[in-house]
């Protein structure tokens, strides 16, 4: 192939492409000419405004989506915890601190030491709660003492560092349970 004929296929291809397009595009229509003043400007010196009227905007429906009424979710009411009852007030009358100490000295489960009432006695109904320290034992924790009754009917229920036993939980008034069990 000679250098002149080497470009021949490209030229033929370009001619075929341009020939297959059909008729050339027609010119766009034009508007009638505006009236002009002697200076070449539109009459009145300003470009006339063309009123523009648009159809009202509408939102086409979105396919596949439907509007559902709002769903109401039932609210759960959490009951507020009942307030912790206050502890029993200090006893007025019996049992006295001396009666509690005498009852403990007669009990073989209590160590034979000097006993001193630190707090109480506190009373609720027929029950009482007292805190007693053991003399001569510097590192010993004070004893909590729970009793029932008054005077000659004063009865030992329990004593120790943890007096929240089943009987106290089941039978003691709320004010004594607060002191003995913390509830």
Image: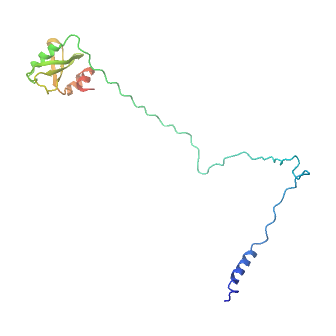
Quarter of the image with the C terminus in it: top left
Q: Nearer the viewer, residue 99 or 14?
A: 14
133 displayed left or right of 77: left
Q: Where does the image place residue 122, in percent across and percent down from the top left?
A: 23, 17
* Residue at image location 84% in from the left, 58% down from the top: 30
- Find residue 95 and report its image quarter: top left
112 displayed left or right of 31: left
Quarter of the image with the N terminus in it: bottom right
Instruction: Give the mark count.
Output: 0
Q: Where does the image place residue 144, in percent across and percent down from the top left?
A: 18, 23
30 versus 115 height, above or below: below
* Residue at image location 22% in from the left, 24% down from the top: 180
136 displayed left or right of 88: left
Q: Where does the image place residue 62, in percent across and percent down from the top left?
A: 62, 49
* Residue at image location 32% in from the left, 24% down from the top: 84
Q: Where does the image place residue 58, in percent across and percent down from the top left?
A: 69, 46
User: Which residue lies most toward the right here?
Assistant: 38
* Residue at image location 89% in from the left, 48% down from the top: 43
Colour option used: rainbow
């Amino acid at each position: 192939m000679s250098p002149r004929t080497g470009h021949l296929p490209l030229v033929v291809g370009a001619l075929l492409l341009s020939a297959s397009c059909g008729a050339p595009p027609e010119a766009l229509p034009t508007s009638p000419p505006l009236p002009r003043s002697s200076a070449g400007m539109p009459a009145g010196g300003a470009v006339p405004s063309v009123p523009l009227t648009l159809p009202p905007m509408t939102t086409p429906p979105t396919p596949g989506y439907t509007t559902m009424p709002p769903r109401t979710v039932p609210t759960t009411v959490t009951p507020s915890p009942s307030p912790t009852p206050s502890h029993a007030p200090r006893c007025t009358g019996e049992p006295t601190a001396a009666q509690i100490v005498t009852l403990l000295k007669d009990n073989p489960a209590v160590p034979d030491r000097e006993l001193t009432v630190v707090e109480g006695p506190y009373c609720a109904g027929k029950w009482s709660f007292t805190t007693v320290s053991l003399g001569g034992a510097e590192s010993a924790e004070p004893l909590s003492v729970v009793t029932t009754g008054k005077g000659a009917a004063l009865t030992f229920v329990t004593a120790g560092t943890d007096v929240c036993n089943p009987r106290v939980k089941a039978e003691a008034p709320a004010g004594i349970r607060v002191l003995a069990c913390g509830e």
